[in-house]
Amino acid sequence: MKREQLETWRETRKQGALRYVLVRGVLSYGVPMFVVMTFLMRRGDIDAKFIALSAVLWGLGGAVFGIAMWAVQERLFRNAGGTSS
């Protein structure tokens, strides 16, 4: 990690893991994927049950993505000499 990246991550991590997962994972990944995969890629009829299931699955997928990205960034941060707090 470069110095600028370290500083950016220091500021990001101050906001906390939960906020990071919600914003970067669920909102920035899960919601767009939900829209694309549910409404743009789906052919045929779309019912409320399918939309609800898709929303839950993509929300969970976004959360998993956010958690994974948090873990990767934390590891890079620590390996580059950042603090572990």
Image (cartoon, helix red, strand yellow):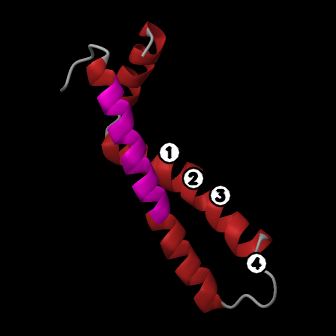
Query: How far is mark 4 from mark 2, CA to CA?
Result: 18 Å
**Residue 18 position within the rendered picture, expressed as x and y whole percent measured from the top left:** 34, 48
Q: Earlier along the polypeptide chain: callout 4 or callout 2? A: 2
Query: How far is mark 1 from mark 3, CA to CA?
Result: 11 Å
What residue did someone put label 3 on?
Answer: 32
Residue 2, quarter of the rendered image:
top left
**Residue 29 position within the rendered picture, expressed as x and y whole percent measured from the top left:** 57, 53
What residue did someone put label 4 on?
Answer: 42
**Secondary element at tag 2:** helix
Left or right: 32 in relation to 42? left
What residue did someone put label 1 on?
Answer: 24
> Is residue 13 at all visible to an observer of this figure?
yes
> Is residue 14 at all visible to an observer of this figure?
no
**Secondary element at tag 4:** loop
In the rendered image, residue 19 lying in the magenta stretch gets the answer no
Report the amino acid beneath label 3: Pro
